[in-house]
Image (spheres, grey):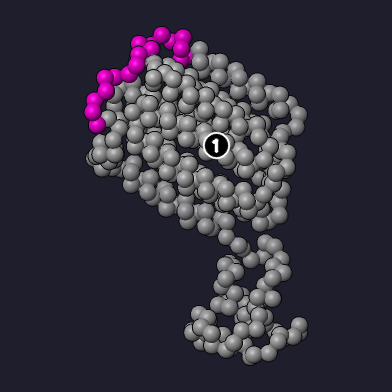
Amino acid sequence: MNIGWYLTVSAIIFCIGAGGVLVRRNPLVILLCLELMLNAANLALVAFARMWGNEDGQVFALIVMVVAACEVTVGLGLVVAIYRRRLPIDVDELNELQG
Amino acid sequence: MSAVLFFIAAIGAITGAFGVVLLRNPFYSVLALAFHLVSLAALFLLLRAEFVAAAQVIVYAGAVMVLYVFVVAYVGGGEQLTTRGALRVLGPLFALALAIELCIAMLGAGLKGVNSRGAAYVPGFGTPGSIGKLFLTKFLFPFEVASILLLVAAVGAVVLARRRRGLEPDEQLEVRLDAPRPAWTGTMAEAGGLRLPIPEQPPTTDAEPVGSATASDGAPSPGSEHEGGW
């Protein structure tokens, strides 16, 4: 398969994730959609690494996975903290920090 | 053969992605994401990224998804939560416009590399050995930074998610402190000589709990350590 096909799949997955971040209100699902976007970027990175025959892109993808794992850890910690404070699990209601 | 596998994996990945966004119950969203990740690992394998595919399955579909499942089971929340108002319409429109734009940009660019099957395959491309060699030579600094980042995230998650004193009333605290416990059963407070053994008698309601007597003067009392207070 041509590299362009992989990039197309990557673009579609990225856009599904972006739409999900905009549409959903549950922070857990928003974290999942962020994962989708990061994974789409990973797919593009690995596809470009294949295109160039160079493994640097795969190393980059692994680093992105590390960053995604950190993001998930902190995000889920925040969700648990929100739940413990009996606040609504809803990003539209959690607007205390707005100016 | 690789075309068939590509289409199966790509359709699986896109279906899983749609499932994450569209399913109402967060638990099903997590399962859809696990399916999506496994399909994506198949795509990585087709791109000769064996180590990345293995890491994807083990780290993501294994560890991170287990974390998600635990948090979803803890928090619960199968309620329907989609945005109200304009964003409900504008969000999918924006995503569609972005998808069309990206596809036009990539497929219409006519770049030679994008329309090729990629560079010639060299044996050993993408194996753990070559990735590890890159990590320990060319990308040593990002590797170390990634490990520090993981440590910071782990500590941060513990600090964020632990139980803090004063945020919510703890109805169970008195019960736990007053629990009839035989003397010198080996709690850490007793070992340090900080906590007197509780006499073996059923607790009365007006009895001052031993742990909260020292907690009132501000210092964190050893008796309430399991509370994790500040």
Residue at the (52%, 57%) spot, across then down? B158
Helix, strand or loop at disc 1? helix
Q: How many marks?
A: 1
For the magenta stretch, what is the residue range? B105-124
Residue at the (65%, 84%) spot, across then down? B180
Residue at the (38%, 39%) spot, across then down? B54
The percent coordinates of residue A8 (x first, y second) are: 48, 19
- Please say whether residue A71 is one of the residues in the magenta stretch: no
Quarter-wise, where is residue B145 in the image? Answer: top left
Q: Is residue A70 visible?
A: no
Q: Is residue B205 visible?
A: yes
Amino acid at circle 1: Leu
Residue at the (57%, 89%) spot, across then down? B183
Which residue bears the numbered disc 1?
Answer: B33
Quarter-wise, where is residue B20 in the image? Answer: top right
**Figure check: B180 above or below A5:** below
Q: Nearer the viewer, residue A10 or A96?
A: A10
The percent coordinates of residue B88 (x first, y second) are: 71, 28
The percent coordinates of residue A67 (x first, y second) are: 44, 41
Disc 1 crowd rating (10 Å Cα; few below 14, some 14-19, many 20+) is many
Q: Quadrant of the N terminus of chain B?
A: top left
- Please say whether residue B111 is one of the residues in the magenta stretch: yes
**Figure check: A83 above or below A41:** below
Quarter-wise, where is residue B230 in the image? Answer: bottom right
The percent coordinates of residue A14 (x first, y second) are: 53, 27
What secondary structure is the magenta-colored segment mainly? loop
**Figure check: B133 above or below A3:** below
Give the chain letter at badge 1.
Answer: B
Left or right, residue A94 beside residue B109: right
| Residue furthest out toward the front | B1
